[in-house]
Image (tube, rainbow, N blue to C red):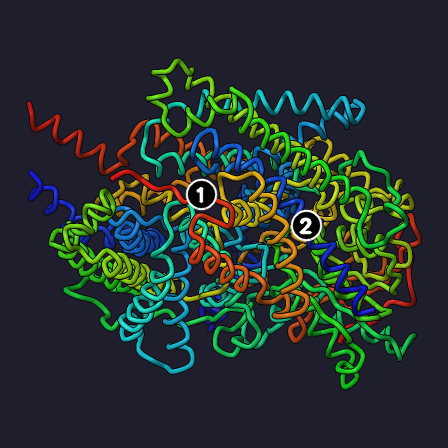
Amino acid sequence: MKNRKILKLMLSLVMACTVSLSWGQKKYDPGATDTSIKIGQTMPYSGPASAYGVIGKVQAAYFTHLNETGGINGRKINFISLDDGYSPPKTVEMARKLVEQEEVLFLVGTLGTPSNSAIHKYMNIKKVPHLFLATGASKWNDPKNFPWTMGFNPNYRSEGKLYALDILRTRPNAKIAVLFQNDDYGKDYFNGFKEGLGDKAKTMIVAEASYEVTDPTIDSQIVTLKGSGADTFFNITTPKFAAQAVRKVDEIGWKPVQYLNQVSASVGSVLKPAGLEKAVGIISMQYIKDPTDKSWDKDPSMLEFKALVKKYLPEVNPDDGNATFGYALGQLTHHVLMQAGDNLTRENILKISTNLSNYQIPIVLPGVIASTSASDYALFQTIQLVKFDGARWVNYGKPVTIQ
Amino acid sequence: MIVETFLHQIMAGIATGGIYASLALALVMIYQSTHHINFAQGEIAMFATYLAWSLINAGVSYWLAFFATLVLSFLLGALIQRIIIKPVERAPVLNVVVVFIGLLVILNSLAGWIFSYTIKPFPSPFPKEPPFGWSIISSHELGSIGVTLVLLILLFLFFRFTTLGLAMRAAAQNPDSSRLVGIRVGRMLALGWGLAAMIGSIAGMMIAPVVFLEPNMMSGVLLYAFAAALVGGIDSPFGAVLGGFIVGILENVLGAYLIGTELKLSVALVLIVSVLTFKPAGLFGKNIVTRV
Amino acid sequence: MQWLFGLVLAVTAVVLPFALSNYHVFQLAMVLSYAIALVGLNILTGYSGQISLGHGAFLAIGAYTTAILIDKYDMHYGLTIPLAALICFVAGFLFGLPALRLEGHYLALATFSLAVALPQLLKFKHLEEWTGGVQGIVIMKPESPFKDIMGLQINADRWMYFVSLFIAIVMFILARNILKGRVGRALIAIRDHPIAAASMGINTSLYKSLAFGVSALFTGVAGSLSALLVSFVAPDSFNVFLSIILLVGMVIGGVATLSGALWGALFIQFIPNLADEISKAAPWAIYGVSMIAFMYLMPMGIAGALALLSRRLSRH
């Protein structure tokens, strides 16, 4: 009888020890150690989309700075960003290198819709978190079929829809002309826009014109669109062409109500070159603080951002919208890793990323909260439309919840 | 309204065509003096424009920067020829093409690294107000066309009526015989490259105010300039400029009225192949008859 | 001497996938695909003297043929390759007909325009149902039919590597037979002395168009393979630069040589990666410098330099 009691006591002691050991135990998947965390990314540093390379460079600087100030939970971040030249076959090769050869813990901020489409299945088969994709395509929010992938940008489709709803609300008899880049990005926005207009799309859209990234100018398209007699203009362009369009619209004396997609709504890299006075009245969407907006001059995260660029990336223009975007990515990744603590498994990283509850990324506009759940991987639930007043983007209406 | 829009499209086509024409002139220059088509011509022009931008950004006045860039780009072109192209001068043409491509890639990458990829506005020497109050073309676009035409005339006169121009054409067409008559072929080639770079820099400084200065500024233009030069006749400056305007107008009109913007490139392709099938040396080129 | 080299190469090719990681095996399979494409380009530009800056277009046609046949018709991937070859042959031959009248720079421009126009065609909305438009087409990576052979594991990567190797060997032998015989001599004659060739009774038009067709056929097979390896096709995979890089690879490998295709493929595949490691700030500047350096140091291409070396060695 006594022996049995002792046995029971010993057993419970052993169990208590095991439980407490596993409680405080560190758990690592490939890429994580006691002293470092390896994460990967593919980014177009060369080729036609090389303008976006800044996003990777800012992130790299963010982690370098972080490492110099102690790292995360005592670990240094080994951030490996590889060039894919915006070519899907190269993205596949580089992603495989990161996962199979470098054995990174997860991929973060990979850029481009075709590039990510190429590795979408692979990342999910390999069960490696494919996080915060630098693209707003709607297909990344698919927890049922692709549980390991989640996007970052507010959905292009939803944004397009919101502009359409705004037109229906304010000017239901508008005649709309659309300029769009002939690729995934342009078409996604346009489809969302048409969805928002519903049945009225056919009658309200009186002209549409596309352009290729390789086109030198879009002057001809703007002339066509003006000639259609439209009084509303949806400008779905990337920064260089957005600046050209904003300027040309003004030059030819066309005065439509203009909607501009968020990707090109940077004051410093688009509106200033085009001419600030030409952009007055443009409606767009913002979710990241704009470096040229004086209201953020004393904002701590903005000051940190500007200092980072000045110290580590002197050749980069701090007013470039891509730079703050990269910074936001860095901050969100930082947050996720902080939360993970010593449980650095891929499953845990994914769990944290897809269960964010009301996290305010510092460089993102106050009130635009990051929130995800197992059924909805979309990061930002609300979108704030803004209008340009000649100097800065001003809130236009209330934040709208995205469906 | 419809007629006004059509006229507007034509004018826009002429303006864009002017852009193609100016780079096409640089291609003609390099071809006349070296019998090579330099694929890196656009990037040299872009790089030269960045040099101008740097000067202006440092406080130098526009015209001073303009002429300084002409000199700098001339030197840049001549140096590239002497240092990078000379070793492959006598190599098969495909090797030279690879060197051109290498040069293109290097210049593009360097520009992105040194000057970043953010677009930069570039000033125009022409007034901001549209000419005569028209709204279908800006003063700058009209002025650039003027500059291109002046360049065209200068180039034509140079090659046709000056001894130097003749010497350059000779050096390109038959280097060995040219040496026998005392022409310093090496010098002619360097000169040709320098002049081509200079013309390219003017093209760049005229184009940048319209499309904004960035490292990939010339990539789209190069194909059309190439097409313009060949369709017009690669050895005819007049043909190249006319080719540029034709390509610009056709591209705009076709895209706007006939097949829509989503098939513009394919139609341009069909057009180019068709023109060349009927006139293999271009509209104004001379058919070279080779000796058996 | 050549026999020994060939044997070593053969043994290495078969043993390598078992010694390397899956990622490297994938890379090697891509090299084989590029090599086939470069053989194709060489037939047209190297042997027949017709410069092409648009061969990326034939890679695209081959790749999309395979992708569409698998995606829409559930065809077995093995069947799609000969079909892609056939379609590309016809496409190449048809393009070769108007190209007959074009020489040198003009032909370069025409082929260049083809390379520029094709991505736009692939995105065209009325063809979207077939091509997947801007989204492209995702295909399943072919599974290996064997779990293992004699205890050696054959996973999907290794299987596709051996498939690529087999096809590459077949294509190389095919090319060798075409080029060593009458056809090859006729092509070289047309390239170097077109007027003399014509006066000797060679039907230059037929041979030149055939060269285009055959060249496109080879490149189409390469495109087909690459689609299977990457498991994805999109218009962005076939931009203008791809065509230019193919030409660069062919020249650096060695114009008018078969082994040059393999060297060129290795250059295209691995030098950009190396350049990226040397400089993240301006990776393609390094790439460009390497192109120029190769042209200075090995004007006959890598194959040419090796031939020179082996001649020097055999003299001693």
Calculate the distance from the C-alpha at mark 1 to the C-alpha at mark 2.
26 Å
Of B285 and C38, nearer the camera is B285
Foreground mark, 1 or 2, reads 1
Could you tell me which residue is drawn at 25 percent across and 73 percent down? C145
Q: Earlier in the sequence, mark 1 or mark 2?
A: 2
Alpha-carbon neighbours of circle 1 within 10 Å: few (<14), some, or many (≥20)? some
Residue picked out by circle 2 = B16
* Residue A315 visible in the displayed image: yes
Judged from the image, the secondary structure of the residue bearing numbered disc 1 is loop
The percent position of residue A254, horizontal first and vertical second, equals: 86, 60
Q: Are the residues flagged by discs 1 and 2 from a single subunit?
A: yes
SS label for mark 2 = helix
- Residue drawn at point x = 31 percent, y = 27 percent: C297
Q: Considering depth in this image, is B175 or A49 the residue closer to the camera?
A: B175
Q: Is A40 rendered above or below residue B170?
A: below
* Residue type, numbered disc 1: Lys
Q: Position of residue C164 (x, y in %)?
A: 26, 60
- For mark 1, name the chain: B
**Which residue in the structure is indicated by mark 1?**
B286
Q: Chain of mark 2?
A: B
Q: Which one is in front, A258 or C180?
A: C180
Determine whether, in the image, residue A262 is placed left or right of residue B204: right
The quarter of the picture where the N terminus of chain B appears is bottom right
- In the image, taking residue C180 as reference, residue A28 lies left or right, namely right
Residue A16: quadrant of the picture: bottom right
Vertical placement of C268 versus A25: above or below? Answer: above
